[in-house]
């Protein structure tokens, strides 16, 4: 039974619109637990007007004062993180420890933003030319929009909105309609931390409101994370409407294991990175590239470890692998796994029977050997607990395989040889690389982003690059001449 309605949050007020709503499910039970209203264009327009008005005051607020909101926010989130983790787990399905992990990684950016005084410092050059000084300022854009996916209901919003707000902007956050409650929780936490009304607004919706955002004349920039086709659409449409855009898309991350690698360590890493969050991470490992004769002993170790994994409700202690987000996502994973056998791959562990009789949207961890490009199981982003194994003869073949992929979010190499590691780092065409690290999400002092179809736009997310994305540079050239130094000069000014 649907029990409650999730509200929009505009200007600090919780608002329900009774127009159109969607059900929010607990994917572990398959039951609808809430409903979420879908904003229409009038609602969006009102929210943008409120945000634009509030932003005029916010950009006047001293940066030291803005920073204090982030110090306070960090302590509120840390104090109440169990409550947030439960909300994440209930709507997304991930386990409670995994939800705590995503909160910790979101907090990294909140803490980075507490250093806004440092990140928003401009540059000054005295005596750039005789008697002339030049100053570069970083100024906010105005109202910006953030559109987020279902798989990180708290972390991805914290990556985007924290930096946008610290930089002096007001935000319209449109969270995934599948997991709307974490964003509302975060807005409340921001307000408790002292953020003025109207700077962070939560507008729920789907395609209609996203189109409104992409075309809105008063929204100056759009940050998006989601699947590749939608990321591409968001990038081209928002850019055609004159906005700055960073649109992060899907992934198909490879993990290469060299014959000299520590095989127990590599097997542990493959299990963690392929089946954590039921494979629903944009940095999940979905293809294991076994080099030389490493495949047989490595697969044996992986298969052995898979028998110890518990499939179940993420909110229950002892669960390792939760459900997929929807029945459609589960059915798609079933279908692609089935196609693997038809296309000539070998299903070593079939996760479908493991989920039989379960009420929620489950598929068990699955392992597929003898996979090749051209098979659906290799070409498609499955976004489920399915690990494909591609056997190659050499390091060079592994690099060529990965560089031919259209996705390029993350990649990992497992080896004990520094020279191969260095060569890999040099040649691999992927945005985030792990050497003996299976999920190389950069820490908050760096920025996050893939290449090719995994990111449309030129700025990575959170960290230093994000402060550039959410600000405009203004360069002021200053001269204080004596009246006697003034003269008419029609030639182009030179130094
Ligand atoms: P999605 O593309 O379905 O949805 C993302 C957002 O776009 C949501 O807010 C949704 O409401 C909106 N949306 C969906 N369809 C739309 C449409 N037709 N028009 C306009 N807006 C639309 O993605 P998802 O299923 O929520 O998230 C999973 C995907 O996100 C995976 O592909 C995953 O790899 C990717 N992802 C990427 C990163 C990264 O950093 N590259 C991080 C997390 C997730």
Image (spheres, helix red, strand yellow):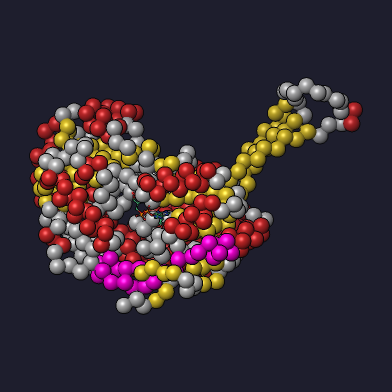
Q: Residue 277's x, y, as percent?
A: 28, 56
Work out whether 349 lies above or below 373: below
The quadrant of the image that shows the C terminus is: top right
Residue 405 is situated, as x and y percent measured from the top left of the image, at 29, 36
Residue 373 in view: yes
Q: Is residue 485 left or right of residue 222?
A: right
The total number of labels drawn is 0
Q: Which residues are magenta?
A: 24-46
The reply to whether residue 61 is in sight is: no
Residue visible at 15% across and 56% down in the picture: 351
Position of 399 with respect to 64 (left or right) is left
Residue sitting nearer the eye, 52 or 187:
52
Drawn side of residue 485 relative to residue 352, left or right = right
Quarter where residue 482 is shown: top right
Q: Residue at x 36, y 49 (%)?
A: 227
Q: Position of residue 214 (x, y in %)?
A: 51, 51
Kindly identify the residue that appears in the image at 21 percent across and 44 percent down.
376
The question of residue 153 being in magenta is answered with no
């Amino acid at each position: 039974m649907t029990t409650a309605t999730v509200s929009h949050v505009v200007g600090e007020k919780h608002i329900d619109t009774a127009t159109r709503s969607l059900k929010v499910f607990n994917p572990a039970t398959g039951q609808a637990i809430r409903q979420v209203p879908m904003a229409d264009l009038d609602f969006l327009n009102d929210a943008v007007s409120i945000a634009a008005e509030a932003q005029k005051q916010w950009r006047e607020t001293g940066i030291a004062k803005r920073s204090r909101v982030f110090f306070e926010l960090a302590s509120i989130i840390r104090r109440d993180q169990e409550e947030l983790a439960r909300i994440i787990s209930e709507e997304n399905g991930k386990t409670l420890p995994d939800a705590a992990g995503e909160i910790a990684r979101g907090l990294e950016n909140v803490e980075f933003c507490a250093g806004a005084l440092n990140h928003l410092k401009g540059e000054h050059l005295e005596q750039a030319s005789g008697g002339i000084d030049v100053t570069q300022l970083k100024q906010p854009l105005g109202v910006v929009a953030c559109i987020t996916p279902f798989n990180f209901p708290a972390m991805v919003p914290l990556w985007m909105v924290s930096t946008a707000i610290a930089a002096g902007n007001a935000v319209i956050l449109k969270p995934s309609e599948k997991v709307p409650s974490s964003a509302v929780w975060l807005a409340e936490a921001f307000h408790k931390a002292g953020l003025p009304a109207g700077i962070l607004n939560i507008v729920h919706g789907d395609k209609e409101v996203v189109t409104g955002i992409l075309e809105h004349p008063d929204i100056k920039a759009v940050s998006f994370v989601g699947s590749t086709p939608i990321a591409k659409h968001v990038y081209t449409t928002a850019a055609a409407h004159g906005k700055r855009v960073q649109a992060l898309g899907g992934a198909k991350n490879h993990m290469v294991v060299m014959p000299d690698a520590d095989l127990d360590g590599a097997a542990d890493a493959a299990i963690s990175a392929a089946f954590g969050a039921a494979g629903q991470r944009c940095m999940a490992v979905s293809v294991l590239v076994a080099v030389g004769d490493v495949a047989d002993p490595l697969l044996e170790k992986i298969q052995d470890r898979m028998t110890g994994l518990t499939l179940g409700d993420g909110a229950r202690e002892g669960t390792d692998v939760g459900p997929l987000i929807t029945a459609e996502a589960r059915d798609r994973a079933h279908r692609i796994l089935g196609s693997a056998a038809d296309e000539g791959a070998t299903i070593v562990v079939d996760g479908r029977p493991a989920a039989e009789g379960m009420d929620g949207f489950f598929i068990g961890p699955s392992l597929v050997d003898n996979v090749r490009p051209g098979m659906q199981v290799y070409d498609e982003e499955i976004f489920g607990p399915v690990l494909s194994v591609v056997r190659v003869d050499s390091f060079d073949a592994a690099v060529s395989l990965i560089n031919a992929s259209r996705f390029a979010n993350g990649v990992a190499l497992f080896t004990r040889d520094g020279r191969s590691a260095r060569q890999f780092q040099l040649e691999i065409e992927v945005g985030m690389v792990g050497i003996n690290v299976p999920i190389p999400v950069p820490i908050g002092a760096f920025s996050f982003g893939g290449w090719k179809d995994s990111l449309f736009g030129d700025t990575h997310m959170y960290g230093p690059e994000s402060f550039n994305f959410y600000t405009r540079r203004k360069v002021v050239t200053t001269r204080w001449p004596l009246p006697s130094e003034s003269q008419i000069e029609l030639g182009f000014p030179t130094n």
